């Protein structure tokens, strides 16, 4: 039976992943959160290096895991343009194929992220998101909310494109082109156009997975029937 696991860059062993893949591992979801070492270390308290992330990516690709998804948290108050640019650079180096899940940062009431914001002299950006605030209000106010920073949005669009082969080539070209309102608009428009392509690719992979699982089940049932018939004929 196909199954899904969550992975971590520092806990990705080629030996273990290969055994899991043989047992039916279909999908790995791995949190990277940011391509910026500063954001990972200072804000998210993630200690893995760029090299360890890329090593984990190589293991997943080498073990031929059918579907690899990387989680990123972007467009939040701690992130500068340099930080999100570094995330783009990291995405261009991840081993293919992969998918991206792009999230905002949720200031969960009562957790350390609010203390970190205060430590950085940053007012918590959600009204009522303290320990006594409404979780629903906080969730709707900030999760995945668009940034008003055009530069941040530009890199966000390029990051989304990197999960498609042709999108990566376009994103690399735009990243080196002169930044103008026209190139920013083109990046955003192309990113939106790629949404249905990404969704269709995901559905195709799921259909192939279900087909393979169904075929395996039929084969197992035939083998069981054959074994029963052999025992009855003895």
Image (cartoon, grey):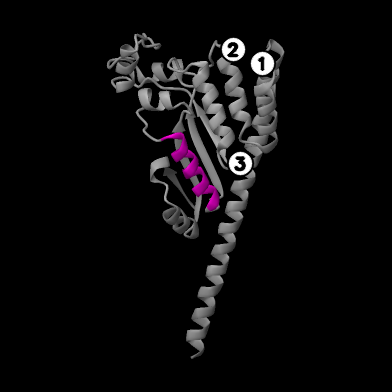
Q: Earlier in the sequence, mark 1 or mark 2?
A: 2
> Disc count in the image?
3
Label at residue 184: 1
In the rendered structure, find residue 150 and report the number of the disc placed on it: 2
Q: CA distance from mark 3 to mark 1?
A: 27 Å
How far is the residue under mark 3 from the one under mark 2?
A: 29 Å
The answer to whether residue 122 is visible is yes
Q: Which stretch appears magenta?
A: 49-62
Q: Secondary structure at mark 1?
A: helix
Task: Residue 57: say if magenta.
Answer: yes
In the rendered image, residue 94, in percent from the top left (x then y), is placed at 55, 38
Q: Main secondary structure of the magenta part?
A: helix
Q: Is 209 located above or below residue 185 in the figure?
A: below
Q: Is residue 90 left or right of residue 121?
A: right
Position above or below: 174 against 70 = above
| Residue 49 percent coordinates (x, y) | 42, 35
Please give left or right for residue 189 compared with residue 63 in the image. Answer: right
In this view, the residue farthest toward the bottom is: 234
Determine contact: label 3, label 1, CB under 8 Å.
no
Residue contact between numbered discs 1 and 2, judged by CB atoms under 8 Å: yes
Question: Could you classify mark 1 by the number of other residues whose Cα lies within 10 Å: few (under 14), some (14-19), or many (20 or more)?
Answer: some
Between 109 and 42, the one nearer to me in the picture: 42
Q: Residue at x 40, y 27 (%)?
A: 40
**Is 168 left, or right, of 143 in this rendering?**
right
């Amino acid at each position: 039976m196909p199954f899904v696991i969550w992975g971590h860059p520092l806990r990705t062993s080629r030996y273990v992943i290969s055994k899991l893949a043989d047992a039916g591992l279909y999908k790995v979801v791995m949190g990277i959160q940011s391509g910026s070492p500063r954001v990972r270390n200072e804000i998210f308290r993630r200690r893995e290096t760029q090299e360890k992330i890329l090593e984990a990516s190589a293991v997943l690709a080498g073990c031929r895991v059918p579907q690899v998804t990387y989680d990123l948290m972007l467009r939040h108050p701690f992130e500068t343009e340099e930080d999100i640019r570094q995330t783009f650079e990291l995405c261009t180096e991840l081993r293919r194929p992969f998918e991206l899940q792009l999230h905002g940062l949720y200031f969960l009431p009562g957790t350390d992220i609010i203390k970190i914001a205060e430590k950085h002299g940053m007012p918590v950006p959600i009204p009522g998101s303290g320990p006594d605030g409404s979780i629903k209000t906080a969730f709707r106010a900030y999760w995945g909310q668009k940034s008003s920073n055009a530069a941040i949005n530009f890199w966000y669009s390029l990051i989304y494109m990197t999960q498609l082969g042709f999108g990566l080539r376009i994103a690399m070209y735009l990243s080196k082109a002169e930044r103008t309102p026209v190139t920013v608009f083109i990046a955003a428009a192309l990113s939106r156009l790629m949404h249905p392509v990404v969704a269709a690719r995901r559905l195709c992979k799921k259909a192939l997975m279900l087909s393979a699982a169904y075929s395996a089940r039929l084969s197992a049932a035939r083998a069981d029937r054959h074994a029963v018939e052999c025992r009855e004929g003895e």
